[in-house]
Image (tube, grey):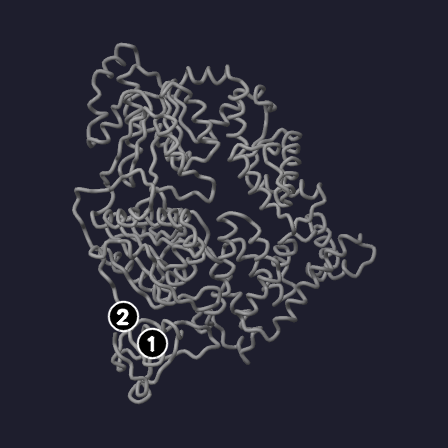
Amino acid sequence: MNAVSLHDAAMDVTHILDGLNDAQRDAVTAPSGSMLVLAGAGSGKTRVLTHRIAWQIQTQNMSPYSVLAVTFTNKAAAEMRSRIERLLAMPVRGMWVGTFHGIAHRLLRTHFQEAGLPQNFQILDADDQLRLVKRVINSLDLDEKKWPARQAVWFINAQKDEGRRPQHIPDEGDLYVRTHVSIYEAYELALSRGGMIDFAEMLLRAHELWREHPELLRHYQDRFHSLLVDEFQDTNTIQYAWVRQLAGDKNNLAVVGDDDQSIYGWRGARIENLQRFTTDFPKAQTVRLEQNYRSTGSILKAANGVIAQNAGRLGKELWTDAGDGEPIYDYAAFNEIDEARYVVSRIRDWVSQGNNHRECAVLYRSNAQSRVLEEAMLRAQMPYRIYGGQRFFERAEIRSAIAYMRLISRRDADSAFERVVNTPSRGIGDRTLEQIRSVARKQNVSLWRAAEWMASNTEIPGRTRNAIIRFIELINDMDMATINAELPELTELVIERSGLIDYYERERGERGQARVENLRELITAADTFDPDDEVTFDATLREGDTSETLLDEFLTHAALEAGDRQGDPNADCVQMMTLHSAKGLEFPVVFLTGLEDGLFPSLMSMEEPGRLEEERRLCYVGITRAMRQLYLTHAESRRINGQESYNRPSRFVQEIPQDLITPVRLSRSAPAPVSGPSRQTSSIATENESGYTLGQRVRHDKFGEGVVLNYEGQGSQARVQVNFNSGGSKWLMLSYAKLEVV
């Protein structure tokens, strides 16, 4: 575009402002200077960012070359660049738009010498970093069982996110810290020798580059006249320091964020950075985007009611002019199976009205909750997809536990042997495994038989031989210990004795916690497994009904569940995901499941105000994903870790203005709790002759108040199951019980 045509284009800027509300216009047209845009969910923040950049280029004679915009995903960066080019009707190749890591990488490639890096330095991905840390731990003669590599990786990355090198970490006599500092030091040397950096290193190295070379910093400060940062509430310490360093005293930094959507504290995000911004830039203008274009009025009022309970907010209340819409439905299930079936039934109703499965999202706090929901989808032959994750039986920790169980059942299962022989690490590395494979090929036997041969061969080096012997003894001991065990007991023993639980408990952060929760959920899966419900059930396999054959059937069930029956990404599928994965997405219909105190919020967060507030922000994010319909579900009882638990509905449900909620009561045809094939199951009458309804509150002279969970029988044989507040769950004969309705 020539100078004349560009000038003409600059004269007509109405298309940049068309369709913006007053607050959005204020943010877009604000004079150059520091600005905080508090952008609520669904308020059009991406639109504001792109339109502001276009406005500055066209009205302030600003070159695209002088704009730096930072986002948190490559997808968001590409979308932002595309929108700006459409608004300007011209390419903007000179503009720096990217993620923190992408921009830092660009700087380091350009100034590799000043950064102390080789020109062709390599970037380690997460798997490469883990492998290198493992080698470092071995080189220091540390026991990896005591000092797991994943824990060391977490420590190193956390220190880099805080801007700390090994020499900056104080030695307070803590063995944990001292040992990990030594690993950190050795790891740094290994990176330097190999000409490598990891992801956490990029920002730290870029920060140090500017700190140690002030002339470079001045060059980029002079170049960038406009700095913009999206999702500012998700920045960590080193990211804030880097941006603050670049901004200097030029007062040209505009940040967009929402303190109510700060949900990544567990991975280093600092909500305090929003408050720090107003302190560091006291002249900054604050613009609030509160008009929501996504959700109905009822949904927004619910979200406002919940988030209002958090202290220290910067202040913001979402609203819409689109009307209140439908009420919010609150379903009180009596167990997790009933909850899952309710979700499926509502989705089926939605689709029967001519809508699509993909318009429905099922959200949960923990990945472990997906199992029961998945099973309900499969039974209903309803297509679904786990967004941003794997199905329950496909998860690495579950596959490892199943592999141990498979090896106990059948020693010649080579794939199971390969998976668990060094998981967790027990000194049987790739070289030893290849030796076992070689012996198996030569002798035409299974890997297990080959390992037994090597264990008995005194010519095998002692360290290798002893490691193999210990593994063989572990499997044999687990087999002996589980001979007479019920399936849930067997499962629990395997995941405990294999070392998987201990291994993942030592892995810090949300990921390790999620893996442990999944392993515990496997116990529940075993406890509720009923082969009679399986399509593949072969009665000839269960003659005698032994635990061994039941184990075989459970393993078959797991293999089938792990098959590729999940919907294609482009197919019409129900979207299932954790609340964290849902951020930034929107759906016409949202199911927010597992809303019980102890589950969401979790027990740990309930005891810590800061964590409870982040859990509440996570609930706020979940609510604001819904566009038209929002369903809240919770269960009177829930099977966790193979044990029945009774939890109150989440406090978050109570924080929603109750006039917005339409309660959905338990139906008479609700299914009985599934307690596993070894337990007696009740035959529920289709017509309730007991005179009581499921979910009804009753009082007993001796046991006090409780809730009706189940009923069965007729006439004088009629009885009812009640979960009493103090006495637990009890079956009572109605002819003697004399229950009083509360």
Disc ID at residue 667: 2
Spatial separation of the CA atoms under disc 1 and disc 2: 24 Å
- The residue furthest front is 172
Relative to 252, say whether 307 is above or below: below
Between 331 and 553, the residue placed more toward the observer is: 331
Relative to 44, say whether 340 is above or below: below
The answer to whether residue 534 is left or right of residue 586 is: right
- Quarter of the image holding residue 140? top right
Between 263 and 567, the residue placed more toward the observer is: 263
Q: Secondary structure at mark 2?
A: loop
Quadrant that contains the N terminus: top left
The answer to whether residue 339 is left or right of residue 391 is: left
The answer to whether residue 162 is left or right of residue 691 is: right
Residue positioned 43% across, 69% down in the render: 644
Kind of residue at badge 1: Gly
- The residue furthest top is 4
Q: Earlier in the sequence, mark 1 or mark 2?
A: 2
Kind of residue at badge 2: Ser
Q: Secondary structure at mark 1?
A: strand
Residue positioned 26% across, 10% down in the render: 4
User: Count the marks: how many?
Assistant: 2
Residue corresponding to mark 1:
704
